[in-house]
Image: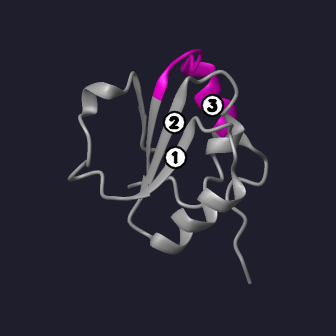
Amino acid sequence: MAIELDPAGVEPSAILQVVDFHDAHVLEVGAGDGRLTFRYAEGFRSVVGIDTKEPEIQSASKVHKFGGCAYFLCASGIALPFSAEEFEIVLLSSSL
């Protein structure tokens, strides 16, 4: 049986209260299947979601289409495959 994380939707609401995603480049560490990505997707310039779980990243890539401004990669937050300076916002909501 699958466990539904945050059924009341508190997590994205809390994030949206403190973070302005408007026109930002976002890095989401621990993106998994993109369950949060689509909840804050409107307004950002681009988002890169990374996770170490290849099946979840593949699922996110297939399901979430944001007009070419969202990318999902199998990577670790410890050894980023790009410069951290590329992003104004970094989310680690489900990574710990």
Distance between mark 2 and mark 3 Cα atoms: 19 Å
Q: Is residue 24 magenta?
A: yes
Q: Residue furthest bottom?
A: 1
Left or right of 11: which side holds 54?
A: left
> Which residue is denoted by mark 3 in the rendering?
14
Q: Amino acid at mark 2?
A: Val
User: Label 2 neighbourhood size at 10 Å, few (<14), some (14-19), many (20+)?
Assistant: many
- Give the quarter of the image for residue 2: bottom right
- Of the numbered discs 3 and 1, the one sitting upstream in the chain is 3
Q: Are marks 1 and 2 in contact (CB under 8 Å)?
A: yes
Q: Is residue 65 above or below residue 85?
A: below
Q: Secondary structure at mark 3?
A: helix
Q: Secondary structure at mark 1?
A: strand
> Which residue is denoted by mark 1 in the rendering?
71
- Of the numbered discs 2 and 3, the one sitting upstream in the chain is 3
Residue 25 visible somewhere in the drawing: yes
> Which residue is denoted by mark 2 in the rendering?
47
User: Label 3 neighbourhood size at 10 Å, few (<14), some (14-19), many (20+)?
Assistant: few
Q: Mark 2 or mark 3: which is in front? A: 2
Q: What's drawn in magenta, residue-wise? A: 12-25
Q: Amino acid at mark 3?
A: Ala
Q: Position of residue 6 (x, y in %)?
A: 70, 53
Q: Are marks 2 and 3 in contact (CB under 8 Å)?
A: no
